[in-house]
Image: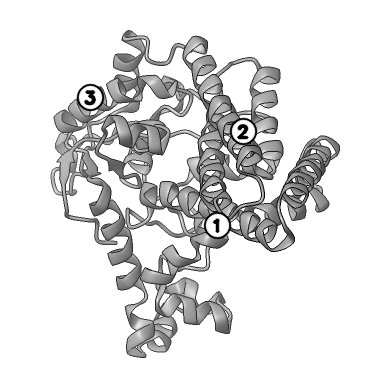
Amino acid sequence: MQRPQEERTSGAAPAAPVEAEQPAAPQHVGTDDVAAPQHVGTDDVAAPQRVGASATFAELLKRVKAEGLLDLNPRYYLGRLALNTALLVAGLVAFFLVGDSWWQIPVAVWMGLCGVQSAYMWHDAGHKAMFRNKRAASAVGYFHANFVNGVSFGWWVNHHNRHHSNPNHLDMDPDIGRRTAIFDIKQYRTRTTVQRFIVRYQSVLFFVLLVLESFKMHKTAVLAISRGDTKRPVLESTLLLLRVAIYLTCVFTVLSPLLAVAFVLVQMASLGVYFGLIFAPNHKGMEVRDGEEESLDWLERQVLTSRNIRPSLVTDFLYGGLNYQVEHHLFPAMPQKNLARARVLTRAYCAERGVPYHEVGFWTSYREVASYLHKVSAPVRSGEVDGLLEQAA
C-alpha cells in the first residue's frame, strides 16, 4: 500500500494490546518480546536493507523507562475521573433544569460528548494505565463502559487486544473486519448489495454513517453477552439493563414523547460521531497487511500503521491522548499524562534509526482517511472491480 505523503518525519516504534479482564497480550513489551533487529552483514550485501532495520524496541523502551514514563500516576487519573463526573453531573443538572423544552437538544449533544470522555476512562483502565490492580481497573471499566455508555467492557477488551496485536491487518485486526467500508479491494466480494453501494461512495458515507456507531455498539454488546463471549455476563447484563431503565425513565418522565425520542436519537448520534471521528484517523489510510503471517516485526507493525495528530491543549483533551497514537501503541500501559514526553523520545529515536513516523494536523488527518477510502473504492466506481477480484482469486 502506498503510504500517505503529507507530513512525515523519520521515526517510529511498536505497540501492545489492552490488558484487563481478559488480557490477550502483555501491557509492557520487554526485551524478551522484541523481534531481533535485522542487520545487514557482510554476507548480505546484495540483500536490500529494510527501513529502520537497526531499530529495536528494547532500546527505545530503555529510554522511556529511564524517565519513569511507565510509572503509574493514580493522582492524575483521580483528577480525570473527578472531571468526567463533573461534566456528567453538569449535563444531568441542565437536563432537569431545562425540563420539557427543545433546548434539551444541546443538552443531548453535551451528554453525547460526555460519553466519549467517559470512554477514555474505560480505555485507559482496560490498558492498566490507570491502576495495575485488576479489581480497580475492572470496576472503572465496567462502570464507564456498561453503565455509562451501554458497551460491553468484556467484549471490548478482547476485541481491542486483538487490534493492538495486529493493527491494520486485513485478517487479524477486528477493527477492519467489522466495518462496512473496505480497506483493500479483496474485501469487496464479501459485501452485500446495500454495503456495496456504501463502498462505492465510502469516502463520504464512512463519516455520515458514524451517526449509527453508538447504536452498533449497543447491538454488539447484547449479541456478545447472549453468545457467551464475555466473562461476566450477569454483571454486564445487570449494568446494561439498569442503565436502560434509569435512562429511559428519566427521559420519558421529564420530556414529552416526541422530545424524548429526539433527545435519545441526538444523544446517541452525537456520541457516535464524536467516537468515530476520534478513532478514524488513528490507523485508516496507513500501512495495511494481509496473509496468515505478519509481514512486519513488532516495532514496525505498530509505528507504520499508526498516525499521530499534532498535539495542542485542545487536541489532547478532545482525543483523550489518542492523538499520540504511535506512542499509545508502543506503550499501551503508559498513563495518558506521559504520552507527550514519550512522543519527543520516540520521534528522536525514529529519526536516528530511519523509521517513518507519521504526524499531521487535525484536518489533514481526515483528508488522508477520505482520500484513502476514495482510492480503494475507485475500481468499484470505474467498473473494474470484477476483473481485479478475478486476478486476486
- Label count reads 3
**Looking at the rendered structure, which numbered label has been put on residue 257?**
none
Q: Nearer the viewer, residue 102 or 286?
A: 102
Q: Is residue 322 visible?
A: no
Kindly identify which residue carries mark 3.
Answer: 344
Instruction: Give the residue type at disc 2.
Output: Val
Q: How far across and down, in percent of the image, does residue 215 sit?
A: 64, 58
> In this view of the protein, can residue 7 be seen by the observer?
yes
Q: CA distance from mark 2 to mark 1?
A: 21 Å
> Of helix, strand and loop, which one carries label 3?
helix
Residue tagged 1: 269
For badge 3, the amino acid type reads Val
Closer to the camera, 22 or 224? 224
Relative placement, left or right, of 63 versus 250 is left
Element class at badge 2: helix
- What label sits on residue 93 in the rendered view? 2
Q: Residue at x 28, y 41 (%)?
A: 309
Q: CA distance from mark 2 to mark 3?
A: 41 Å
Q: Nearer the viewer, residue 194 or 118?
A: 118
